[in-house]
Image (spheres, grey):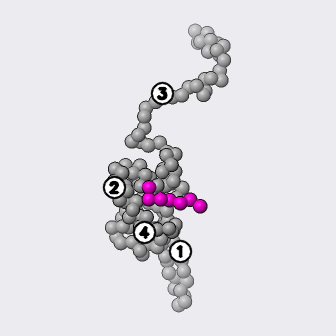
């Protein structure tokens, strides 16, 4: 069972929305205040301004929705909408298993892994055949 913390969500929000850490922490606190120790919450708990934040995070893959149809005693269908944390995505971003566009450092490609298996004769053979 994966547990998402405020810090995990904050780091994921910071990267996905490309915003500063302070604003990301604020957004993460708002979201986690709704979820608490739960994996999903009912949409009715949100106000419109909070729902806008949730939609923004859903667009970035950090939250997702699901719905459930319930049959009422009078025979009508009742649809309930839920918000769920995309735990794997959030944890992947918080554990630095992604390449940050902000912190990307230009490095030359590592040729050792491919070329180290070729013998020196291979290089001279290629050089001689191209002349």
State the residue position of label 4. Answer: 34
Give whichever of discs 4 and 3 has the lower sequence position: 4
State the residue position of label 3. Answer: 108
Q: Secondary structure at mark 4?
A: helix
Q: Residues within 10 Å of mark 1 (few under 14, many from 20)?
A: few
Q: Which mark is residue 23?
A: 2
From which residue to which does the magenta span run? Answer: 1-7
Q: Residue at x 56, y 59 (%)?
A: 2
User: What is the C-alpha distance between the residues marked 2 and 3?
Assistant: 34 Å
Left or right: 38 with respect to 26?
right
Q: Residues within 10 Å of mark 4 (few under 14, many from 20)?
A: some
User: What is the C-alpha distance between the residues marked 1 and 3?
Assistant: 51 Å
Q: Nearer the viewer, residue 101 or 37?
A: 37
Q: Secondary structure at mark 1?
A: strand
Q: Residue at x 43, y 64 (%)?
A: 32
Q: Which mark is residue 68?
A: 1
In front: label 4 or label 3 = 4
The reply to whether the magenta stretch includes residue 5 is yes
Q: Residues within 10 Å of mark 3 (few under 14, many from 20)?
A: few
The image shows residue 47 at horizontal and vertical percentages of 35, 72
């Amino acid at each position: 069972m994966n547990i998402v913390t405020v810090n995990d969500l904050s780091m994921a929000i910071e990267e996905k929305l490309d915003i500063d850490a302070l604003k990301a922490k604020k957004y993460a606190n708002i979201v986690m205040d709704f979820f608490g120790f739960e994996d999903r919450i009912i949409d009715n708990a949100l106000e419109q301004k909070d729902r806008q934040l949730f939609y923004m995070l859903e667009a970035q893959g950090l939250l997702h929705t699901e719905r459930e149809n319930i049959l009422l005693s009078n025979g009508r269908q009742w649809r309930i909408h839920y918000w769920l944390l995309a735990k794997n995505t959030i944890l992947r971003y918080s554990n630095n298993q992604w390449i940050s566009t902000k912190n990307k450092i230009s490095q030359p490609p590592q040729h050792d892994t491919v070329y180290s298996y070729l013998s020196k004769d291979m290089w001279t053979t290629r050089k001689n055949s191209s002349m």
